[in-house]
Image: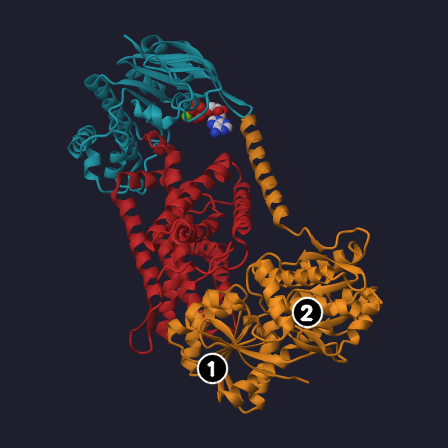
Chain colours: A red, B orange, C cyan
Amino acid sequence: MFWQQILNGLTLGSAYILIALGLTMVYGILNLLHFAHGTVYMVGAFSSMVAIIYLKLPFPLAFLLAMVLAGLVGILIERIAYRPLRNAHPINILISGIGITIILENLFRLFFGAQTRPFPNVNLSSKTYGLGNGLSITNFQIYILVTAVVLVGLLQILIKRTKVGTALVATSQDMKAAKLMGIDINRMVALTFFLGSALAAAAGTLVALYFNAIYPTMGSMPGLKAFSVVVLGGLGSIPGTIIGGLFLGVIESLGAGYVQTVIDANAIAFVILILVLLIKPTGLFGKKIEKV
Amino acid sequence: MKKTIGKRLTGIGAICLATMLVVAGCGASSTTTGAAAGGDKVVKIGFFGPLSGDAATDGVHAKNGAELAVDQINAQGGVKGVKLQLVAEDDQASSKDALNAVQKLIEQEKVSALVSGSYSGPTKTVNPIVQKSKVPMVVSYAVHPDITKGGDYIYRAIYTADVQGDAMAEYAQSELGLKKFAVLSQDNDYGVSIQQAFTAKVKELGGSVPVSRSFKSGDKDFNPLLTAIKGAGVDAIYVAGYYNEAAQICQQAKQLGVNVPVLGSDGFDSPKLIELGGASTEGVTFTTPFNRDEPRDVVKNFVKTYKEKFKEDPDMTAAQTYDSVELIAQAMKTGSDTESIAKGLSQTKDFEGVTGNISFNAQHEAVKPVIFVKVDQGKFVFVKSISTK
Amino acid sequence: MSKQIAVKGLEVSYGSVEAVKGIDLDVENGEIVTLIGANGAGKTSTLQAILGLERVKAGRVEYLGETITNQPTHRLVRRGLALVPEGRHVFPRLSVNDNLSLGAYTRSISKAELQRLKEKVFLLFPRLLERKQQMAGTLSGGEQQMLAIGRAMMLSPKVLLLDEPSMGLAPIVVKSIFQTLKRINEEEKLTILLVEQNAKMALGLAGRGYVMENGKIVLQGSTDILAHDPGVMKAYLGL
Ligand SMILES: Nc1ncnc2c1ncn2[C@@H]1O[C@H](COP(=O)(O)OP(=O)(O)OP(=O)(O)O)[C@@H](O)[C@H]1O
Ligand SMILES: [Mg+2]
């Protein structure tokens, strides 16, 4: 059963990575903790649902549309909640993010109700494939794993191989110098929020499909876990986030499978968070950390 | 520079304000249904339950059931000319909020009776102030044994955790021939008390429980627990919990290839179970007080009118809460003050509710049948009914 | 000769601190002008205000005859205004090559043209060619300064503003960098506004100069005259 737990953990970790990348990218460019990121994950799942039910789109299109919509919501959040506070104390920015979270969750609760809804029927029934030795994987797990690999790969290509990607990296390394290169900082920030939010929406949709559950507060726990992942990996480091996500997913699975009586699975993330902050505040791959 | 700081503060202020408005907008304002203050004499009945938050489905359905009962009683001219008015408060399934809600209902609204449409934890918490204020309360569907203790004002319209835990353990072993169980329980008063009863009875009858794990309300990923269960080779999984998590468990068990029967408690009894769990819930058997297919007139009438009013099928919490209000109404026949209602409740005998014939025993617990329901082709189907002491 | 840059009555403040208190300054086509002054005189603030990096509180900035007061930096850069900032500000975790590419970020040019521009920079600063793939953060201070200037040259700017390029560098490195600046000015007819504390070097390079003290211009004129001004000699040349 050990390898099954590892496989479960890798699936979970892939979802964490997709959520956490947005947090890490935003931190990298603006040095701010984007507290409302978890809600964007929720917005993504609801957008897919709306696209499937009301716009009658096939799943892949709904999925892409949800990524775009959530991306725009991310841009909007930055405009409304963060840009007016760009030079303010980090605590103010954090509070602003919390405010946005509360507003969005309540807005969705008003429109869609607080109850858990099933993911709309998209003619994707779950299939389980045996891998021998009692090990099995479902098609949903495969979707999550493959999507994570593809999206992370595309993100890497964008960042490493394109001009705009270099500009993004430049902005995160030195904003003033980036301005002097003629880079429009606000566009880079918007792009960062767009990309991060789109990735979170992808995770939200896939996890909603996997667990067949959509509800307005669905983003809060994943949002907090993503925060642990980012701290674990080192704030602002993309490779660190990837390793951190996989690590947390696997540890949680093993923990819940073997030592549940000692520690609750959800608590593991926060124990790790505290340990990292105590022992190595810069995380596995982190550069210097800002005082908050 | 001053200007930008000013702007910033306005920004923060605006956000805080908007947040407060939104929160207040959906937050804990009470809603009132039924008779308005007019010529008739009106008695207020206080309701509390999770009308928002994770458990909102249960709370809202419970409130629907209570509303339907109040409307029907008032339409028939009330109880001896006295009309009912329902005052509902949201407790978000939190003990703290329930305490506030009940305090408000008793002190400000001056209700003559209370209905708990909430879970075991919150209901247990409000016990002392309810007993102390001497306001009679009927508990709709919370099953923790302690809820009715400590006084003469709290009655329960559902049987306790041990009744259904015992019943399922007996049924599973003697009728289904299952011996080795994995138990998954929600880590709250409800789940723990049922799990304890079930486990004790299984062992008493010679079976075993090699794996027993708990989960939290709102948990979604059960793969690690089910993987551990898969390794243990059990005959069945018993889940003492609610439909949200139960649906996940059924689904993920199927996906992991854990192909043993899933048995459950009355928290399974919601159309949401099938909606969320889909085909994986096929064959799931659970205990409940409510048989929606029963051919009795009260049941047929309830199912029909509920569906007309709320555009969906009633579930267990709706039926239980409907009965709770009806129990209060029939106790009012001798008088509508708190003492008369409490006395009336204590004398309840063979009251025909939608959840069976209800009597209260000396411990203020409902005595009524335990019903076994099974999911068959995407529908809840009656299996059998056993009477309890 | 036309004015490339004209600053009129410029004021810059940080909260209640008035850093620049109404100065006039111009730079004409093809000349090298220097702005010298002690620590905290307001030199950097002036350059930043011209480039839109700090808000202009009062006054006007003109570039090529057009008012550009408080325009966003990236637009001004697009129009050929380059600043080599104080402290160099190279991108530390990008290679020398990537740093140079970013200098031409706003220009739509072919790969070949980009390559040609880089080669021109390597001709000016051969050291950079040797370190082409090295992370900029690992370069020495002098090399970083060369990179910062080279990066600005990638824009083929109309006016080059430099903020204390000599800061923290050995005299011999400063000398070589200043020679390169001279060469750029002569060969490319590039207009340069040079902010310096190293008055001796700056006055030697520039044709005209301004002396700034406490947010005000206290002296201006040809560098020959300034270099012989008793006040300047005492305060800035250590004579
Ligand atoms: N961001 C800032 N916030 C507050 N005050 C500032 C800021 N930047 C500069 N100042 C103040 O403005 C004044 C002018 O500073 P500026 O950096 O323009 O001087 P400078 O002439 O470039 O000095 P140096 O030669 O040391 O670089 C100084 O008193 C400085 O303390
Ligand atoms: Mg300076």
Say which chain tag 2 marks.
B
Amino acid carrying label 2: it is: Asp
The x, y position of residue B305, in whole percent, is: 61, 63
Q: Secondary structure at mark 2?
A: helix
Q: Residue at x 54, y 54 (%)?
A: A113
Viewer-closest of B384 and C204 = B384
Label 1 or label 2, whichever lies nearer to me, is: 2
> Quick one: A127 or C225, which is closer to the camera?
A127
**Which quarter shows the C terminus of chain B?**
bottom right
Q: Which mark is residue A43?
A: none
Pick whichever, A250 or C87, lies toward us.
Answer: A250
B287 is higher (above) or lower (below) than A56: below
Q: Position of residue B287 (x, y in %)?
A: 57, 77
Q: Is residue C135 visible?
A: yes
> Badge 2 is on which residue?
B323
Q: Tell me which chain the residue with mark 1 is part of.
A: B
C-alpha span from label 1 to label 2? 33 Å
Residue furthest out toward the bottom: B206
Specify few, some or many for label 2: CA neighbours under 10 Å numbering under 14, 14-19, or 20 or more.
Answer: many
The quadrant where residue C8 appears: top left
Disc on the earlier residue, 1 or 2: 1
Q: Position of residue C209 (x, y in %)?
A: 35, 13
Q: Residues within 10 Å of mark 1 (few under 14, many from 20)?
A: many
Q: Is mark 2 within 8 Å of ligand 1?
A: no
Above or below — where is C71 with respect to C6?
below
Of residues B384 and A276, the one nearer the viewer is B384
Provide residue A28's location: percent of width, then percent of height.
Answer: 40, 44
Q: Which mark is residue B236?
A: 1
Secondary structure beneath dot 1 equals strand
Residue at horizontal 32 percent and vertical 9 percent from the top: C224
Give the quarter of the image for residue B161: bottom right
